[in-house]
Image (cartoon, rainbow, N blue to C red):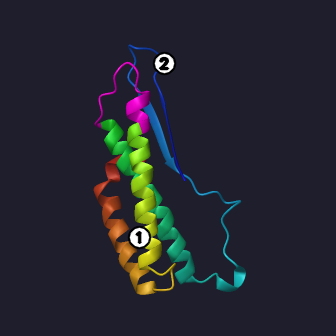
Amino acid sequence: MLMANYEKPNPLKKTKFKIAAVWDRKKSWIAPDSKTADELLYYQVLFDIYEVHARKLRKEFSETKFGLNPEAEFRGKYNTATENLTEEANDYRDETNEGADIAAVKKWNEKIKEEFKQLEKFKE
């Protein structure tokens, strides 16, 4: 999931935000008989997609001038980011046939690595 929150202690302080891509280990699993390098890569790329979107949101928030009441702008940007994330994750699942097309998974892996390079400044 993509978790985000903000803090504005008083009107004179700058709005601070925290964004994290989170993978719940208790809800994540791979059947032992299908635990292959290809299967693990599929899930790693999926998590990396979440991390790319966390970095994009950090970038967007860092470029935003929040007013005295940042709630509406924060919510709007967060909602848009989660919609974009859901769309890209669904595209990844579809284009890789849920990981069955390993060539497509590797192509996505390269794409995501390139996005990581471009967003290195926004790594938490």
Specify whether residue 76 is painted magenta.
Answer: no
The residue drawn where x is 35% and y is 73% is: 110
**Labels 1 & 2 near each other (Cβ < 8 A):** no
Is tag 1's residue or tag 2's residue first in the polypeptide sequence? 2
Main SS class of the magenta portion in the image: loop
x 35%, y 60%: residue: 116
* SS for dot 1: helix
Rendered location of residue 71, percent (x, y): 44, 28
The x, y position of residue 37, in whole percent, is 55, 82
Give, as a single range, the part of the protein colored magenta.
63-75
Q: Is residue 77 left or right of residue 7?
A: left
Residue where numbered disc 1 is placed: 91
**Of discs 1 and 2, which sits in the foreground?**
1
- Identity of the amino acid at label 1? Asp
Q: CA distance from mark 1 to mark 2?
A: 39 Å
Disc number placed over residue 46 in the picture, else none: none
Write the residue at 40% across / 73% down. 109
Quick check: 47 above or below 32?
above
- State whether residue 93 appears in this view: yes
* Residue position for label 2: 9
Per the image, is 74 magenta?
yes
Q: Amino acid at mark 2?
A: Pro
The correct choice, above or below, for 117 with respect to 91 in the image is above
At horizontal 45% and vertical 56% (from top left) the residue drawn is: 51
Q: Is residue 17 toward the left or the right of residue 59 in the image?
A: right
